[in-house]
Image (cartoon, rainbow, N blue to C red):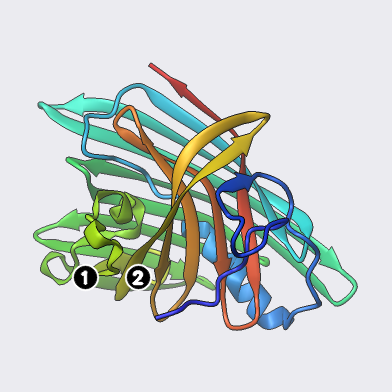
């Protein structure tokens, strides 16, 4: 199945071996309601990233957010790797700030997302912040073979419970980095989407090997695509030192698109 994903800025469909981290070309004015909906996808954009090897140290990543060719925000993601009773543990935190002020639209998003992965699986999750002035708080934890989310939105509490057996991975675990794309065939798995608090059937597809350029340095990476009933995106990622580094993500909805591009990624032992 073909996905209508954004083309890499400055390239033709056939000249896509290199990914330059530069702002995309300006786009036409989009349907602002769909654009706002798409920007909220940034809340759960940057998952923690275990790979097959044991991760070590810490990683701090900074990103710029673009839409319609304008830089509208920043994302900072940190990961701390440790060990608990012989099991590898990753603690992550992602801070997202988006502020857009156009003639036809004003929008702001300020969130802090954090969580814990143990043995490569999400066991705790939280998201706090404001989406265009509306306070939204989410706390989740894995207990008794269920992932329980306690949500407060517009001051109203509710609870969502997801059976652990109903999903194979969560969106916080970079499941595509562990999939086998032998033969380049698409792979579909059941994923717990922590943004929508629901299990979705998500299809992953290997696109190509590429090279990303950040601050004049070149990094080999893989380009992978995913899609489900809520969204589709393309990611530039690389496995290194037991973790997965994301250099870029381009996403699209019905009539909207965005690009999140790394400005720096620092790993410490």
Q: Is mark 1 on a helix, strand or loop?
A: strand
Q: Where is residue 268 in the image (x, y as percent from the top left)?
A: 43, 19
**Residue beneath disc 2:** 197
**Residue beneath disc 1:** 162
- 60 vs 262: above or below: above
Q: Where is residue 102 in the image (x, y as percent from the top left)?
A: 86, 68
Q: Which of 31 and 25 is in front in this view?
A: 25
Residue at 44% x, 29% y: name it. Answer: 59
Quadrant placement of the C terminus: top left
Q: Nearer the viewer, residue 203 or 208?
A: 208
* Marks 1 and 2 close (CB-CB < 8 Å): yes
Q: Residue furthest front?
A: 14
Residue at 37% x, 29% y: name it. Answer: 80
- 11 vs 57: above or below: below
Q: Position of residue 125 (x, y in %)?
A: 34, 52
Is 215 left or right of 104, judged from the image as shown?
left
Q: In which quarter of the image is residue 72?
A: bottom right
Q: Which of 13 and 70 is in front in this view?
A: 13
């Amino acid at each position: 199945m073909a996905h209508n994903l954004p083309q890499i800025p400055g390239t033709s469909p056939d000249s896509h071996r290199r990914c330059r981290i530069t702002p995309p070309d300006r786009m036409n004015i989009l349907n602002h309601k769909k654009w706002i909906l798409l920007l909220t996808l940034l809340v759960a954009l940057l998952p923690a990233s275990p790979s097959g090897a044991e991760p070590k140290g810490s990683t701090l990543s900074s990103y710029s957010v673009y839409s319609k060719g304008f830089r509208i925000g920043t994302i900072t993601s940190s990961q701390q790797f440790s060990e608990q009773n012989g099991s590898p543990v990753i603690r992550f935190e992602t801070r997202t700030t988006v502020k857009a002020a156009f003639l036809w639209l004003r929008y702001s998003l300020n969130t802090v997302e954090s969580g814990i992965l143990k043995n490569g699986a999400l066991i705790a999750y939280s998201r706090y912040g404001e989406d265009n002035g509306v306070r939204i708080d989410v706390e989740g934890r894995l207990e008794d073979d269920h992932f329980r989310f306690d949500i407060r939105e517009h001051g109203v509490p509710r609870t969502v419970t997801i059976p652990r057996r109903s999903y194979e991975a969560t969106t916080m675990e970079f499941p595509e980095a562990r999939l086998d794309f032998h033969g380049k065939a698409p792979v579909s798995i059941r994923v717990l989407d922590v943004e929508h608090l629901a299990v979705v059937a998500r299809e992953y597809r290997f696109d190509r090997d590429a090279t990303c350029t950040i601050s004049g340095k070149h990094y080999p990476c893989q380009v992978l695509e995913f899609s489900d009933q809520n969204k589709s995106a393309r990611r530039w990622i690389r496995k290194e030192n037991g973790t997965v580094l994301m250099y870029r993500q381009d996403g699209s909805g019905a009539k909207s698109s965005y690009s999140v591009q790394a400005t720096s990624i620092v790993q410490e032992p």
